[in-house]
Image (cartoon, coloured by chain):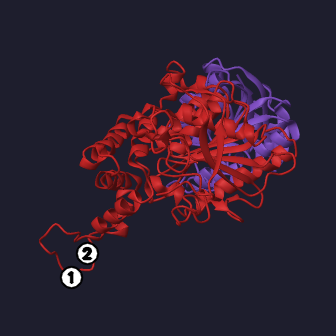
Chain colours: A red, B purple
Amino acid sequence: MNTDIKNIKKLIIDQSLELDCGKVIKGFPLAYETYGNLNKNKSNAILVFHALTGDQFVTDINPITKREGWWTFAVGPGKAIDTNKFFVICANVLGGCMGSFGPKEINPETNKLFGTTFPVITIKDIVKAQKHLIDFLGIKKLLAIAGGSMGGMQVLQFASLYPDLAYSAIPIACSASHSAQNIALNELGRQAIMADPNWKKDNSSPDKGLAVARMAAHITYLSKKGLQEKFGRKLQDKGSLKFSFDADFQIESYLRYQGAAFVDRFDANSYLYITRAMDYFDLEKQYNGNLSLAFKNTKSKFCVISFSSDWLYPTNENKEIVIALNACGANVGFVEINSDKGHDSFLLNVPEFLKILSQFLNSTYDEVNNEKRI
Amino acid sequence: MKKEFKVISKIIDNNKRVLDIGCGDGTLMEYLKTNQKNDVRGLEPEKDLVRKCIAKGLSVIEGDAEKELVQFPEKSFDYVVLSQTLQAFLNPEEVLNQLLRIGKQTVVTIPNFGYWKIRLHLMFKGTMPITKNIPYEWYNTPNLHMCTIKDFVNFCDNKSIKIDKSMCLTNEKISEITKGNMSYKNIFSQLGIFLIQ
């Protein structure tokens, strides 16, 4: 995968950024993409945060992978996040592999790839880097910040770091602190990568390990019911069981495909670093065990959304965020969307979800632009 | 907007923080927000209604008052509103305690089971009363704890809950309830509206 092509916009951040791990980085690239046009008074900008394996190419065809952007269902002209109306910004996270500063960049000091010598980064570091992008674009206040899964964690972190920088905040299918189960599942993926003998070899990538990590993770993005309905015990191009370890079942074949397709577009070390950032995310701990202190000064209007069949970031974890926001008197709405599609619901065509996203954004836009009180 | 909501909105001062429990499609919230500059929040168990509210730009949380009210801090709202829902809770007393804890003042409205048509229905038909305001059969009613205006006033007295205002509605007409007219109002009112703390 070559990301050194002209289609990638990069902001070189000259200011130094002190990472949570103590290291200071400076002069590093942040790759980003924008959709739609910024209006005259710069009041229609929405900062979208991508999830673990996403990138800045939110919608349209990703120029690198040639696949559809990860949030094509939600973002685009006439869609829920309507790019005819809104200016959508998304940056590749720090530690990512789509042009931002990450383990697959060359370390100028050694002229070698960073690999695992890259500093461990956190959600807070990721968010701080993106603040520079907002400043660079000259936006004083965002109409909204939005994201699902790890993107939702960035929404929460952003809202707590910059309480007056977004009129509204939409954390979707996420959690304010990674649970033991979340960490366990990420560790499974990391160990799969590190168990691949290619992982430590120069000029080779642990494709097998990364594919297994993706397969395992992919299961967690779906619901049992969704899997059963889509695949059941259906066989793959076969009339009967073959009494071998080939992919007899459709679900096996599907997961193998997901794994194989993933290694073409993702860097194994980025996977290690970004899952680590997610595991380290504990907003409650950042505020001495009181999550509502994270939002004490927030001026944003929140719309928290969860999905009924999401067992990775279940409704009750999303509700913890709502409770914390209520406890400090913040402006918050919450709805759980009925869907059988599991955690992945936020990426898929779930009409009820897309409708609420659109309506919330439009009502916020109207309030902001009519200078009404939110 | 129905008369009941007009009465409630008159009770509520401008520029105050209001929590509407069981806010439905947000009609009252929207009115308070737009016309009285109130800072309003809602709690509603029905997903469809929550979505309608959010679409209108109202901050409404999907949830059941019997479980969710504990999360709100003490006296975090100037007013808490509970319209014709008290009787539908499993434990109305506990819900009322929560409302009084969260709100500096609480507006509660109750469908009056002492209304004469209800009394006559039971007396002459011998079956559970069904009226325009209480249109359910006994086997599908959400109303688990019906009470009369008198019941509610007695309850407040027993629990040392202070009643700041007590009013009643009959055929869209609003009037005050006093100690002197209580028995009369308890027969001729469809709805009781109380401001308590």
Instruction: Indicate left or right for B104 with A260 as reference.
Output: right
| Type of amino acid at the residue the image marks with label 2 | Leu
The residue located at (63%, 21%) in the rendering is: B74
The residue located at (33%, 42%) in the rendering is: A190
For label 2, the residue is A235
Q: Quadrant of residue A269?
A: top left
Relative image position of residue A96 (x, y in whole percent): 50, 45
Does residue B92 show up? no
Instruction: Indicate left or right for B98 with B104 as reference.
Output: left
Q: Quadrant of residue B135?
A: bottom right
Number of other residues with Cα within 10 Å of mark 1, as a class: few under 14, some 14 to 19, many 20 or more: few
The chain to which mark 2 is attached is A
Residues at badges 1 and 2 in contact (C-beta under 8 Å)? yes
Instruction: Give the numbered dot on residue A239.
Output: 1
Relative image position of residue A123 (x, y in whole percent): 52, 34
Q: Nearer the viewer, residue B140 or B95?
A: B95
Q: Nearer the viewer, residue A294 or A196?
A: A196
Tell me the distance, in whole angstroms, between the alpha carbons under discs 1 and 2.
7 Å
